[in-house]
Image (tube, rainbow, N blue to C red):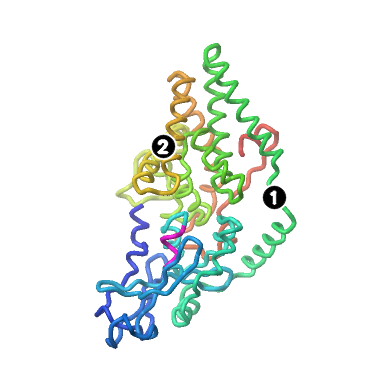
Amino acid sequence: MAFLATVSFADAFSSPTSSSSHVRKITTTRSNLNMVATSPTPGVNTGTVNGENKSQVPMGWECDDEANCVEIPACDDQICRTSLDVRIHGEWYDLSGWRKAHPAGQHWIDWYDGRDATEVMDAFHSEKARSMWQRLPKSKPDALEVLSADVVPDDTPTQLAFRKLRAELEADGWWERDYVREATLLSIWFGLVAASVATVSVAPPLSTFLLALVMTNAGWLGHDYVHGVDKFTDFMRNFVCIGAGLGTTWWSDKHNKHHALTNEQGVDEDVATDPFLYTWAPDPKHDSPLRKIQHWIFPVPFSALFALWRYDTMVVAIEAVEQKRPGAKTELGLLLAHYFLLLTLFPFGVWVPAVFLSGLMSALIVTPTHQSEELFEDYQPDWVTAQFESTRNAKTTNPFSEWLWG
């Protein structure tokens, strides 16, 4: 998104007056999203980096993929690298040296510059990853003074209570996976696949309906597997590629952002559904006459949801291969295998309507849970309260709807 480019880490670089300048104080730059970059202000030239005392030159960090970090000069002949300060469980850490090694991509680290990432760290990371962040270098005192006083409010009682509750639930075993339940859900999915194949010749409309259920259910299963942080979900991570034709890279980049920054306008792509569905009044130059009647015609754009996701998936998967992202070739291969099986087992008149029917079912499920709730124009520092305000639960009344809603 072009919107995100305005807050990228590259924009937080400052140019030194010379290659051997040293830091006297910290300057701050505030973006329109309340993000702050703290950067060294070049001082008086006291000599070259080589052979000089570290305290006389701006220093940064370089980290490996195990979060082992060493100090390096922050400035070269052209630029000074800024610090990238993120708060986790009440402590500020400089993640500027870790961003390149971050397995999920640099954009996540950039987005939390000058922000609290405690809930994101706890929810999106494995036990191993949650044991690593304490190795990262803490923010320098002068940067800490600016950040603590001017940027991020203190943790609220709601946040602190939530963290305590989460720790208690994890200690009591609520995070342990129920493998019988997982086997039951996968058995239902494979049964639907077999039934849709068995009826493709004798009852094509029934096969279409069953195949739509296959795709929708694969999406919910894939949702849990992609967002999961244990060994089972690591193994099942690419299930959604072969089962639903949706990519893990696309899903992670898009949907993790939805869970981390729920209903934040311009950031959460799950609520950025225009021009198919306008959830808030757009800029007049981007408006559409269809917005006036969208409450009558919404089943049509809703039906295109899965088709659009499939298209976006292939675009992102190919880009991931070109960028040499980890696992990208395997992911693309499984997506191609999905389409090989789909085209081999089902005629055009069955699988294409199934894609649109699945899109309609999925959109009718996901839209009421968020779009009808609070939408935020600004960044929400209290993640816990934001979840209560932006998310609606669904009360299901029978086993089928319980299963269908995931």
Residue corresponding to mark 2: 308
Residue 176 is labelled as 1
- Indicate the position of residue 317 as horizontal and vertical percent values: 40, 42
Q: Is residue 247 or residue 78 the one in the foreground?
A: 78
* Depth check, front residue: 279 or 130: 130
Q: Residue at x 55, y 35 (%)?
A: 218
Residue 314: give x, y in percent of width and height. Answer: 39, 38
Q: State the image coordinates of residue 397 (x, y, percent, origin top left).
A: 70, 36
Judged from the image, the secondary structure of the residue bearing numbered disc 2 is helix
Estimate how packed mark 1 is, as few (under 14), some (14 to 19) or many (20 or more) residues with alpha carbons within 10 Å.
Answer: few
Q: Residue furthest right?
A: 172
Q: Amino acid at mark 1?
A: Glu
**Residue 315 horizontal side relative to residue 15, left or right:** right
Q: In the displayed image of the protein, which residue is found farthest to the front?
A: 51
**Residue 14 in the image: above or below residue 168:** below
Res. 189 mark: none
Residue range (magenta): 97-102
Judged by depth in the image, the label closer to the viewer, 1 or 2, is 1
Q: Quadrant of the C terminus?
A: top right
